[in-house]
Image (cartoon, helix red, strand yellow):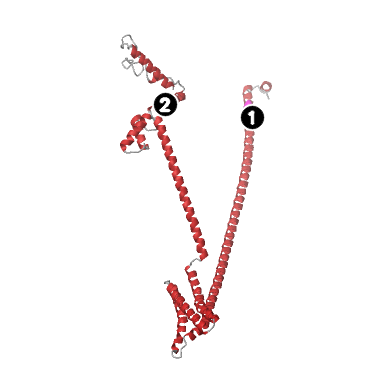
Amino acid sequence: MTATSIEKKVNGHAPGFDAVALAKAEAIRTKAAAEAEAARIEAEAKAEAERIKAAEETRKQKIANDKAEARAREEQAAREARIAKLNRERAEEERAARQAREKAAAETKAEEAQAAEVAAAEEQWRKYALSFYVVCSVVALPVQIAAFYDPNAIWLMAAPIMLEGGAWVVLKGARAAAASHRPHWHYRLIAWCLAFIAAGINLWHGLHAFDPATAIGTAFASIAGPGVYDLHEHGQLRKRDGKLSWRQRRAAAKAAKKEAERKAAEEARRAAEKKAAERAAEEARRKLAEIREDAFPKVWAHAVRLAAALGETTVTEAVWKRAHRDIEGTDPSETAEIIRLRNAAEARVEAARQKRPVNTVAKTMNAQRAAQMPHGPNRVLKTRATRRPGDTPKYVGAARKQASITAKKATKEKDA
């Protein structure tokens, strides 16, 4: 309903109402309805936004939960893999330890079996040696007894038993001395002497009373019995004391000779290298001395005199450093010229950084103004001095020429 229709209606039917008020009321109602509609739409939009936001949050939360669950599964799988790996490593270590124990047990068993075999062989060898000694004594004694037989001196027949038994007793003494780590060579020497005496008796009596075969056989038996038994005992002693055989000693001697030759060659090589290094160092010192003498003749002459004064046969580094400081006033790595060049280079770099020209001689030094020229009245404001005729006396021609030369040199140094 428009304002005109309201006005017509009022004019036609309700002359007592104000049309303007009714129009305003209608406008207010329309505005309120529009605001309510806008509020509803806004509320719906907010609700939809909240719903969308909630849905998005739910989706993000679901994704986060899925990621957390996947991460948890991965961590669980990794944990299970680590546990499985540790179990495998433990099982491998246990298997390796078991194999090592079995191997060690097998080696111990083999060593024990070998030791038992060696011991059995040694015991058998000892029994055989002892049996052989007895057999040789039985073979050798009759001829010796016959040699000492005398119806008027029957007691002389005990002499062969004394000889054979004496050799046996002395060999046992040698074994006892070796067991207590005492010298045993004299025991063995006595046993061999007794064996040779018995062999000599058998040989002499056998040749005179019997035949050569009997003489030689019984003489051999007198020596072979004690000899074989001593061979057994001597072998046992060498084994116990860890002595090397002839072949092992020869191999050890060859190895020691080769090692000595290698050491001698190594020492000769080191001596040659040292001598070559000394020659190279001496050549380097000579070249350095020549370079220093050519490059710094004044410093070198002073260094030579200083070295002689200090009792040095050559110009050492300490003497050279002192001489350089005496002549140049600085260490060998610097001179006044180097310092000037460095200052100039630093000034150029600073000018390049500040983007100003390098030739700023007038700012650092005024070569055209003498020290006696008056300054401005106000130094703080840097007022330029006013030159008036007669402020300073005129320079003579030589002074003006020298000032011009000095200014040009300063400009060239700054440009360099």
In the rendered image, residue 35 lying in the magenta stretch gets the answer yes
Residue at the (50%, 73%) spot, across then down: 231
178 or 221: nearer the eye? 221
Q: Quadrant of the N terminus?
A: top right
Q: Nearer the viewer, residue 12 or 88?
A: 88
Q: Main SS type for the magenta part?
A: helix
Say which residue label 1 marks.
34
Asked if residue 55 lies left or right of residue 369, the reply is: right
Q: Nearer the viewer, residue 236 or 389?
A: 236
126 lies above or below 379: below
Q: Is residue 204 visible?
A: yes
The range drawn in magenta is: 27-36
Number of residues whose C-alpha sits closer than 10 Å to that of mark 1, classed few (under 14), some (14–19) or many (20 or more): few
Residue type marked 1: Ala
What residue sits 45% from the left and 76% below the top? 193
Name the residue type under label 2: Leu
Check the image and report above or below for 229 versus 357.
Answer: below
Question: Which is more foreground, mark 2 or mark 1?
Answer: 2
Q: Note whether residue 333 is visible.
A: no
* Local secondary structure at mark 1: helix
* Residue 402 as seen in the image, left or right of residue 165: left
Above/below status of 403 relative to 318: above
Residue situated furthest bottom in the rendering: 152
| Earlier residue among tags 2 and 1 | 1
Q: Which mark is residue 341?
A: 2
Q: Residue furthest front?
A: 208
- Please, what secondary structure does the residue beneath circle 2 have? helix
Q: Tell me where residue 361 sits by quadrant.
A: top left
At 52% from the left and 64% from the top, the residue drawn is: 247
